[in-house]
Image (cartoon, rainbow, N blue to C red):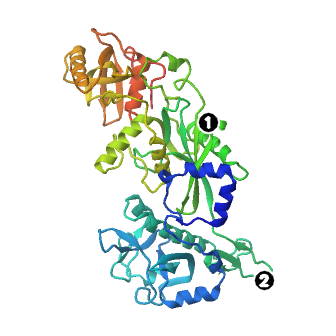
Amino acid sequence: PRVCSVAAARASRAAPLRRAAAACSAAHRVHFTTDACNLELSDGRRRDREWLAAQLEGGEARFVLVAGDRGASVAVRAAQEGGGLLVGELRRGAELPAGLLRGEPIFLGEIEQDGGKVAVFAAEVVQEQLAGEGEGAESGADDVRWVDLRKTCSRGELPQGDASLLALGRQLVVWRRSARFCGSCGAPTRARKGGWAATCTAAGCGVSVYPRLDPCIITFVKSHCEQWVLLGHNVKWEAARFALLAGFVEPGEALEDCVVREVLEETGVRVEPSTVRYTCSQPWPFPQSYMLGFSAKAEAGAGGSGADAEALPEGCPSLPPTWLAKCSTDGELACSKWFHVDWLREHRAAADSRGARWDARGFHFPGGYSLARRMLEAELASPSAAWTGPPLPFARLAEGKQKWVLLRVTDDNGSVRLTIAGDPRAPYHADILAHEATRLQEAGAASVECLGGAFTELRTEDGTLRVWGDSSRFGPAHEGATAALLQAGYPMFALNIERIPGTVVSGAHAE
């Protein structure tokens, strides 16, 4: 990957930039950057009109084609091997008939090919000249078709480098379309610097504009105890899709202040300003955002630390800082939820092993091309607390009504973990204990102890989890431990813990 010599020199002199670069390691390598597609921007070439004209007429230049009312479609070429897609770098001539391109092509930069450099341009296509336009439609070349770039990236059908080059071309074409007229006087503009600037043609005006970038923060919010992650669900998304919290930077606002404000507005959670840290960034050309990644901790509160955490039994996860899922004040988020980091690790590993998306009652995270996915995966890469015993979910319940027991499991090193085990077929709580003790000890547990039991009804259809009663043999289970384990193990369900019929324990999750 190429590194700008000026940026490298500055980084060598600036310790903060070195630390930021370390945080943005290979785990954070992202889509939609010039580095990802090995594109040399060649700023000096943008001013050389004769060289640009020679490249356009020489027949060796490549073109990224963009079409659609909002530049939604780009041209891609079917791969010769593997059945995938390659970037739509088309040559002028048979593949680009006269009259197909609208306006002056935009010079993106140069890529290395066959020991030399080849110029790459982006251009808007006149829709009337197309054989077809839109998802899956054919273009003038036999092996080229039109696709929606964002959807194609989300499906993983394009290599990172190709997607990055297409995205840059699409972003500049969409910007150039919006800058055809001067924002000051309304006169037409003329492209300069190879299409990277537009200048008003009116005498006495001459205002120049450049490609627009909208800065947007995206934040990995952890609880004060660092066991929980705050994710939000956008009103426009499918039912169970969650992502990191994001929002646009306001004029006059520091990036760190934007993190604090956006999290509070969207979720009602207060972030400790001193914990806000920059991690990485990503161009987001849909249409012209620039994502700036941060991490932050929520303020200490009930459940995350303090007296509530101290009252929980050993081996129990902490309670999340807040139970009630908040809706954003501006209506952008339908809800926000706290997810335990070990639950996210477990389902990421399960999804990776079967080549599928993360899934638990429909839960899934945005695709690998997004910065949100990369940030979360980097944070989850660190292992959880040492545990040498058998794998233990927070809770293991079946559909419908059932008895369950709260178990205290110890490994050979003396580490303790709590888990809830249910069984709709067991006539007594003691039967569940006997079965689980045998299974866990055969799997490597040193000891298994019952700390109480109760009844529950799990309803996947409406996403509810109701708990009531206690065990006549082992007594009631610890209320705080029950709430923490079920919230950690079933974050997509609304939890209702009843002390007696109609009475809800303080702190129980209700939506």
Tell me if mark 1 has few (under 14), some (14-19) or many (20+) residues whose alpha carbon lies within 10 angstroms of its own: many
Which residue is rendered at x = 43% and y = 30% of the image? 385
Q: Which element type, helix, strand or loop, lies under badge 1? A: loop
Which circle marks residue 271 in the picture?
1
Which circle marks residue 203 in the picture?
2
Viewer-closest of 10 and 142: 10
Viewer-closest of 17 and 353: 17
Q: Is residue 189 above or below residue 174?
A: below
| Residue 99 image point, x, y percent | 48, 88
Which residue is rendered at x = 53% and y = 47% of the image? 332
Q: Is residue 128 left or right of residue 108?
A: left
| Residue 255 image point, x, y percent | 66, 48
What amino acid is at disc 2? Answer: Ala
Viewer-closest of 201 and 317: 317
Lower sequence index among marks 1 and 2: 2
Q: Quadrant of the rendered structure where residue 199 is?
A: bottom right
Q: Is residue 392 left or right of residue 3?
A: left
What amino acid is at disc 1? Answer: Val
